[in-house]
Image: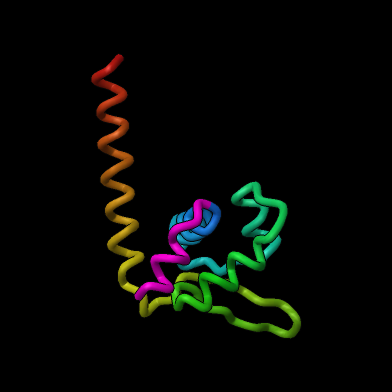
Amino acid sequence: MRIVFLALGDEIRQLILLTLLEQEPKEFRVNEIAQHTYLSRAVSHHLQILKNAGLLQIRKEGTKNYYSIKKQTMIFYQMKEMFSKMECTMKEKQNLDQ
């Protein structure tokens, strides 16, 4: 479990995971993830860390690798709900502040 928390401790990896969660069940190639997250370097490195932590799965098709959230990792669906609730709460707070 420690490796999961280490993988989640980096903001770039958090951004990659959120991007994949928002587009789930779609699979992405490295360059597509880089475009969606506006990252230019080290995306492959971060994807490898997330994969090694058991958070992502890879589907190979010829020379292309497609990344997606590992279906067996139910924590992501719970996290997705949590982030959605947080986003709604933040929007409500902004509306009250106006």
Query: Horizontally, is 59 left or right of 74 in the view?
Result: right
Q: Residue at x 30, y 33 (%)?
A: 90
Quadrant housing residue 45: bottom right
Q: Is residue 57 on the magenta stretch?
A: no
Q: Is residue 54 above or below residue 40?
A: below
Q: Residue at x 44, y 58 (%)?
A: 9
Place of residue 30 in the rendered image (x, y in percent of width and height, measured from the top left): 67, 65
Q: Quadrant of the C terminus?
A: top left
Who is closer to the viewer here, 66 or 8?
8
* Quarter of the image with the N terminus in it: bottom left
Residue at the location (34% across, 57% down)? 80
Q: How many marks?
A: 0
Q: Is residue 75 left or right of residue 41?
A: left
Residue closer to the observer: 63 or 10: 10
Q: Residue at x 65, y 47 (%)?
A: 38
Residue 2, percent across and down? 37, 72
| Residue closer to the observer: 18 or 50 | 50
Q: Which residues are the magenta region? A: 1-11
Instruction: Please name the predominant secondary structure of the magenta segment in the image.
Output: helix
In the rendered image, residue 2 lying in the magenta stretch gets the answer yes
Q: Residue furthest top?
A: 98
Q: How far across and how far down the image is residue 46, in percent?
A: 59, 65
